[in-house]
Image: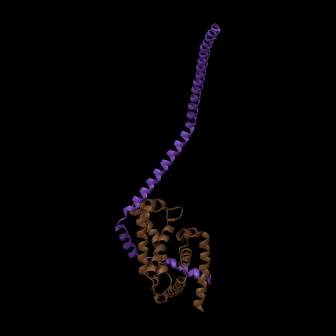
Amino acid sequence: MLEGEEKLIKGASRGNAGDFDRLYSHYIAPIYRFIYMKVTHRQEAEDLAHEVFLNAWQGLPSYQSRGFPFSSWLYQIARNKVIDYYRLKKNVVGLDALGGMVDLAKTETSVETELENNLNLEKIKAAIHKLNHDQQDVLLMRFVEELSYKEISAAIQKSEGAVRLIHHRAVKELKKLLNGANS
Amino acid sequence: MENEIFKILESARSISPSAEFRERSRRLIFASTRPKNASIRESFFGNFKLGLTVAAASFAILAIVGNYFYPKSKESSLLANSRELLKEVENLDFKIQLGEIRYLDTSAKEIAALLKIIEGAN
């Protein structure tokens, strides 16, 4: 959570662009990452992430926290955007055909390690895409974004117990898929 | 296996949008017009809620105040009415009694006079 977040949210909902800009800077990367892991195309992930923040900026005057973090609200918007995206675009290109498109930030690791990581990530992403939407969201929010079960439950509008169950099933299913792919 | 999966998923934390995209997206967001109806709707419901609360509070105060004063006034007016009624009844009785005495007196005299006439005739 961002320091002084409540104040920033209030300011942004009153139309203060500076306050919203700070919220944007803090949350754009995790929201983009979440979308990117679900749609795979960099361009589409950018478009959807932009739409999430545009909706947030326009919808902030009616935003009510109800005890949940602001990030849960953003993930909720992102989640709906991805669902709409898949609803509109039924003919999604398979991940296998997108080799080498992973947009990882440059790190100090060697080219060889980076390539290996990318390929492994591609494989896991392909397996994740075979899970249902809830399982995908819970896995990504939990392992990539490190959200708590409470935050995830607010974002996907399900009870914490249900989120734990989805998480358990998702991990089991993912292992099964990866084992099947390896054999 | 599980740990390996999580390790690879954790490596995805380094994915981030380009600076160029961030800048473009920001500019587009702040150039967009914010719909006014959302805030109007909010303020309407906000005012409506406030109005409803004030009305409910006023009603509750009226009910409490009314409950406190109403039975007393009712009681006192009932008492006053009953007292007046009793007085009226008492007066009425008294008037009836006087009327009866007067009637009995005159009728007794008339009867005595009639008896005398009858005796004289005999």
Instruction: Determine which quarter of the picture holds residue B74.
Output: top right
Q: Is residue A46 left or right of residue A69?
A: left
Which residue does the image show at 49% across and 79% down from the upper left? A38
Residue A153 to residue A66: above or below: below
Q: Can residue A17 be seen from the camera position used here?
A: yes
- For chain B, give the colour: purple
Q: Residue at x 57, y 90 (%)?
A: A181
Name the spot of residue A176 as percent of width and height, x first: 61, 86
Q: Nearer the viewer, residue A121 or B103?
A: B103
Report the side of A94 relative to B105 (left or right).
Answer: left
Q: Residue furthest top?
A: B120
On the question of residue A105 being in view, the answer is no
Point out residue B57 in the picture as x, y percentages from the top left corner. 51, 46
Compare residues B64 and A62 and report the one nearer the observer: B64
Q: How many marks?
A: 0
Q: What residue is rendered at 51% in x and 68% in y?
A: A72
Which colouring convention does the figure follow?
by chain
Quarter of the image where the C terminus of chain A is located: bottom right
B46 or A46: nearer the viewer: B46
Identify by letter the chain in brown: A
B119 on left or right of B9: right
Location of residue A83 in the rendering, given as x and y in whole percent from the top left corner: 48, 77
Q: Quadrant of residue A103?
A: bottom left
Residue A77: x percent and y percent? 47, 71
